[in-house]
Image: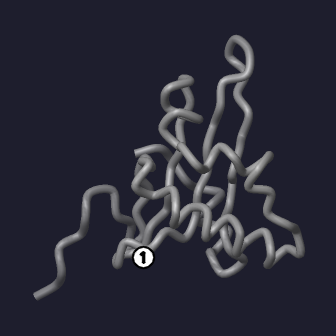
Amino acid sequence: MGTAKRSGENALGLRLRPASNKDCQDVVRLVEEVLREYKLAPDPACTDADLRDIEESYFNRGGIFYVLEEKDGSIVGTYGLCPVEGRTCELRKDIYPKSIPKVLIQNRQHP
């Protein structure tokens, strides 16, 4: 008897879902971890300030913010889109550790 798949879960047990403010702390932790992995410094007062309130920074402004989570609920990837002007959006927080297979990133689709 197998375990039931969660809604939106792929064959590897990963699920892409819209983020909420409940995810802020885990998202900040992941972003900081991945930035350090690439020898970059987090900037919580400026470029990463949007992560303090994901719902306001993205959804309330007409954007989206998704998290990629494992079966246990741990967040292993993120990406957000923010409207800039007209039909133009800015890709933000496209964050995945080096350990996430590139094929998962390249073939992602919105649920």
Write the residue at 58% across / 57% down. Answer: 78
- What's the residue at 68%, 74% (across, down)? 97
The colour scheme of the drawn protein is: one colour
Q: Is residue 39 above or below residue 104?
A: below
Residue 35 in the figure: left or right of residue 86: right
Residue 36 sits in which quadrant? bottom right
Q: Quadrant of the N terminus?
A: bottom left
Query: Where residue 66 appears, x then y in whole percent?
Result: 51, 49
Q: On the image, which quarter does residue 103 sit in?
A: bottom right
The one nearer the camera, 29 or 106, is: 29
Q: Which residue is mark 1?
A: 12
Q: Position of residue 32 (x, y in %)?
A: 71, 69
Placement of the C terminus among the 4 image quadrants: top left
| Drawn side of residue 8 relative to residue 64, left or right | left
Q: Percent from the top left, x then y, of residue 83?
A: 66, 24
Q: Which is more toward the observer, 59 or 51?
A: 51
* Residue farthest along the bottom direction in this orientation: 1
Tell me the amino acid under the disc marked 1: Leu
105 vs 101: above or below? above
Where is residue 93 shown, x and y percent of the image?
69, 51
